[in-house]
Image: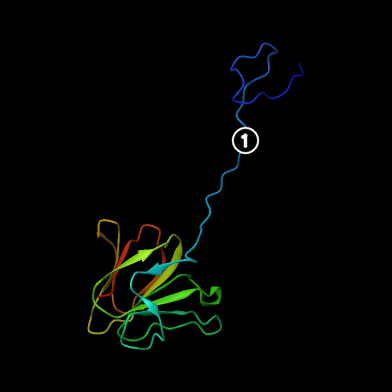
Amino acid sequence: MSTGTAYAQDSAARADGTRVTAPTHQTTVLNSGNDNASVDGVGQCAINQSKDCWAWIDKQNGTPCPSGHFCIYTNVWANEGGKVFSLYRCRDFTLRRWNGEGLYHNSNTGGAHGYLKGSGRNVLKDVAPGESGPYDFGPVYYVRAC
């Protein structure tokens, strides 16, 4: 028998003196992104309307969040493309397949805050009007638009 590395499935004490080691695997956690992200009940339309909808992000100029809306973007930067969800109605929206970095922006008027919520509807982020920023949407299950 030749000497060398024995693997974990081999016996722990080898008669030839070789050590038992587990194979080395490098594990990398990948951000799988928000490519297939959706918001229940929100369809595609022009986002400058007084309703809930989503649109593709303009990669050249970005897609601003309309006044009176709370928006969530599947990517942080406009040149990354993706979708913008423009939420108008004051209710909790259920998110699907959001598992990476995105962006939020509150364009609500009249002082209405927006909220990013966890699985138990606990508030993870209270977003004041005019506030925006990147956010890891992995733990976000709901968004309240006002």
Give the labeled residue for mark 1.
24
Does 40 sit above or below residue 13?
Answer: below
Instruction: In this rendered view, identify the residue nearer to me: 7 or 112.
Output: 7
**In what quadrant of the picture does the C terminus appear?**
bottom left
Does 18 sit above or below residue 32?
Answer: above
Q: Give how far across and how far down residue 17 sits, in percent.
A: 68, 14
Q: Give how far across and how far down residue 9 sits, in percent.
A: 59, 24
Query: Which residue is at 53% across, 54% downward?
Result: 30
Q: Is residue 128 left or right of residue 133?
A: left
| Numbered circles on residues, count | 1
Q: Give how far across and how far down residue 12 sits, in percent.
A: 58, 17
Instruction: In this rendered view, identify the residue nearer to me: 58 or 96.
Output: 96
Query: Which residue is at 50% across, 73% downward?
Result: 82
Query: Which residue is at 52% across, 50% downward?
Result: 29
**In what quadrant of the picture does the N terminus appear?**
top right
Instruction: In this rendered view, identify the residue nearer to me: 36 or 23.
Output: 36
Query: Which residue is at 28% across, 74% downward?
Result: 145
Residue positioned most to the bottom: 49
| Amino acid type shown at disc 1 | Thr
Instruction: In this rendered view, identify the residue nearer to me: 48 or 127.
Output: 48
| Helix, strand or loop under label 1 | loop
Q: Is residue 31 left or right of residue 21?
A: left
Does 44 sit above or below residue 143?
Answer: below
